[in-house]
Image (tube, rainbow, N blue to C red):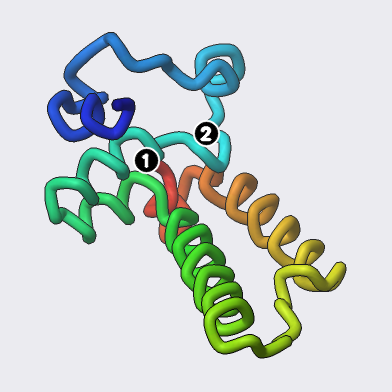
């Protein structure tokens, strides 16, 4: 249901979608800013434009695909491969990447301004 709204309506043009409260209060971009526009772009086949709205979605995509592959192999082929996502170092690394992305997308000079939505 919600995805159909993202497909039919562009979040940058319609006010039915919620605005980021962090950005509204502080004026800074959070790691999720631009995600609604990115989802809309992805659903219409505009991958480059989607990544311009929020580049960190690439990390999410990698994590989801990796997790799905490991789960499928473990359940479908009755294997027991260790899922690296369940390792504390991986969790901390992803957190560091997200925090760095959050900081760098608010730096207002090239090349960091390319990270802002």
Q: State the residue at coordinates (40%, 48%).
A: 54
| Residue 84 appears left or right of 9 | right
Residue closest to the far right: 88
Q: To which residue does mark 2 refer?
A: 29
In this rendering, is residue 94 above or below 38? Answer: below
Q: Are discs 1 and 2 less than 8 Å apart at CB?
A: yes
Image location of residue 17, percent across then percent down: 34, 16
| Residue 22 appears left or right of 18 | right
Q: State the residue at coordinates (15%, 54%).
A: 46
Image location of residue 100, percent across then percent down: 66, 55
| Residue 72 appears left or right of 35 | right
Image location of residue 83, percent across then percent down: 71, 77
Q: Residue 96 appears in which quarter of the rendering? A: bottom right
Q: Residues within 10 Å of mark 2 (few under 14, many from 20)?
A: many
Image location of residue 62, percent across then percent down: 49, 69
| SS state under label 2 | loop
Q: To which residue does mark 1 refer?
A: 117
Looking at the rendered image, the quarter that the C terminus falls into is top left
């Amino acid at each position: 249901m919600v995805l159909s709204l993202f497909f039919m309506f562009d979040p940058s043009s319609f006010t039915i979608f919620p605005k980021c409260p962090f950005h509204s209060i502080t004026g800074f971009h959070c790691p999720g800013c631009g995600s609604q526009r990115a989802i809309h772009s992805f659903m219409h086949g505009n991958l480059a434009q989607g990544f311009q709205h929020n580049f960190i979605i690439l990390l999410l995509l990698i994590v989801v695909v990796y997790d799905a592959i490991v789960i499928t192999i473990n359940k479908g082929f009755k294997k027991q491969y260790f899922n690296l996502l369940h390792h504390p170092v991986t969790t901390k690394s992803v957190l560091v990447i997200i925090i760095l992305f959050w900081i760098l997308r608010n730096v207002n000079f090239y090349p960091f301004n390319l990270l802002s939505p």
